[in-house]
Every structure is written in C-alpha cells, then in structure tokens.
Amino acid sequence: MDLALLERLLADRGEPAYRARQVWEWTARGVSSYEEMTTLPKALRTSLAEDVPFSTLDVVTERESLDGTVKALFRTHDGHPVEAVLMRYCDGRRSICISAQSGCPLTCTFCATGAMRFGRNLTASEIVDQALHFRRREQLNHAVYMGMGEPFLNVDEVLASARLLPDIGITHRRTTVSTVGWMPGLRRFVDDVDAPIRLALSVHAADPVKRSELMPVNDRYPLEDVLAECRRYVALRRRKVFVEYVMLAGVNDSPGDARALASILDPKAFKVNLTTYRGCPFKVNLIPYNPTGSGYDGSSRETIERFKQVLVRAGVPATVRLTRGRDIEAACGQLASAHRPA
C-alpha cells in the first residue's frame, strides 16, 4: 500500500488524521481488502478501494517448495519484476527474505540476481508490500533484506520500510540487513540507525584479488575498509556482525581460505571492549552454493565441515546455513524472476 498516497488522499478529503493510522493497523494485521476494515465508514472503504490500490505490487506467480518455502514473483506498477520468499522452520520461525531493488547493479558472479538487467530501487511501500503479502497468509517473526539488490544502495527506503516491520510482528532485533559492503549506505546505517537492526556482511573471500573476481564491488570499496566500518558498528552498537560466505568448490573453500577468513575476523584486531560478546563479535554463516547457471559448483559437505572447524578452532563462531527452497529457485543467490540466463 502506498502510505504516502493514502495520507494525501485522506487529507484532501478532510478525513481525521487518525484514519491513516486505522488503515495501516488493519493492513499490518493481515487483512486482505479495505472491506474488512470495519472501523472505517463503508463509503470511505469503497472510495479507498477505487483510489488507493491495496498493494503497490501485483502477484504474477507463486510457487511452494517441498520443504514449505514459498516464493512470490511480483510486478511493480511500471512492470519491474521483484521476488520475495517465505521460509518456514520447524521451530516456529516464519522468516521472509525481501528485496530492496529489482535486479542488482553490482554483478556478483555467483548470484543469479546479478545476471539480471537492473531495474530500479524499490520504494518503502513496495518493500513492505512484500512482507504484507506473506502476512496475509500467516504470522511472521523474522525478516532478512537478502533478496534482490543491494540494500545500502537504497538505504533511505530500506530503513523506512524496516521501521514499519514491528507493526507486522517482526521486531528490529529479528530484522537483518545484508550488504556486500556499499560504504556510503553502510556508514549511514552505522551512524544514524539507533534501532537494534542486525547487520550482515557478504564476504565470500578474504583474499582481495579473489574477492574482486567474485564481487567487483571490492575494487571500489576494499574489504579492509568495509571491515573497519563493521568494527565501528560493533563499537557503537554493541552488536555482532553476521558474515555471509558462500562455499564454491575449488574457489574459496580450502583450509587456507578458512585461515585467511579467521585472520581478518580476529577479535584482537578490535580496539573495543569485547566482554559484551563473550568472544568474537563476528558470526560466520557458511552458505552451501545453490545452482544459478553461473558455472560454479558447490563445495561438498565434508569440505564445508572442514572449513567450519578451522574457523571454530580459531575462535570464530560458524554455522552452516540450512538451504530452503532450492527446488523452486528460492534459495540464497537464486532470485532472478524470469530473467535468469539459460
């Protein structure tokens, strides 16, 4: 729902200021139409249905995985494709992976979204409408900005959308924004955001040359500088940083690669009091590679486990991410709508 349009229309019609809040509260609860908003006069409900589309996104397709994951393909009003994912877990978590852009201009070589034609940044309303689509299906409690696009290339709209998620049931402490290290947006996030929103950094290689081959953004914003900003986040916010690391067979998965990653995340490099964290203020998520047509192969389970153990022995916490929705191209790195190359 375009909340700015809603507020303008209500103001132009002389409606009380609380009407916009009423509409939002109903929407955040998961109703599927204005007609269900029974505290609004019927004439107003009819008028809103005609003048303010209930969603800024049109649903094109929806697919459900064998593991219960659901992927939705949307179109914006001007025709740009957007994908978002609902992930269901046995422990009761209902996590949504939402997109900040249609496509992505940063062209990470292992990511299907990077192979798309970049469309544009999404508005805060378009981002929130991805969440609301799944909220109308069931209760939600976690969100990750890890779908299409680089969130910090669209930092204002991303943060505006994140501030609305608690109304939907997703607290700031259960919201994570992921970046490849786009420094202007990262600095804004570190300096301006006092809400306890989590930060995740996509690393994927500790070696600068190798990282630049995988992630061209490293040439513009070197990992060393990005990590320095993450350390500043730790010092100011007293919160961990999550490190994302996709496991590519024969590319970045050797014991030497693991030692290099542990070295750059060494807590002794921090000039802050680390007692709050009971150890390393980084936590590494090792991500099994999901096929994207990029030409890479995924590391074996045994290789991933060996990599993890190198990190753990070095004092860096590490887990292996559970893959969800791979059979419907909904897993990490696979979001690409209909534009995926053959």
Image (cartoon, helix red, strand yellow):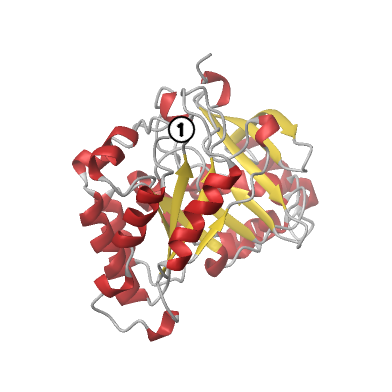
The percent coordinates of residue 42 (x first, y second) are 77, 50
Q: Position of residue 79 (x, y in %)?
A: 52, 23
Tell me which residue sits at (29%, 68%) in the image: 231
| Residue 279 visible to an observer of this rendering | yes
Q: Label 1 amino acid?
A: Cys
Along the line of sight, the residue nearer the viewer: 82 or 241: 241
Q: Quadrant of residue 141?
A: bottom right
Of residues 283 and 195, which is closer to you in this image? 283
Q: Secondary structure at mark 1?
A: loop
Mark 1 Cα shell of 10 Å, populated few (<14), some (14-19), many (≥20): many
Out of 37 and 153, give the one closest to the viewer: 153
Circle 1 sits on which residue? 111
| Residue 94 screen position, x and y as percent | 70, 56
Which residue shows up at 56% across the image and 26% down it?
337
In the visual, does 303 lie left or right of 250?
A: right
In this view, 191 is above or below 132: below
- Relative placement, left or right, of 3 versus 86 is left
- Is residue 218 positioned above or below 320 on the image? above
State which quarter of the image contains the N terminus.
top right
Q: Can residue 16 be seen from the camera position used here? A: no
* Left/right of residue 266 with respect to residue 318 in the rendered view: left
Q: How many marks?
A: 1
Q: Residue at x 57, y 20 (%)?
A: 338
| Residue shown at the point (47%, 30%) measured from the top left | 113
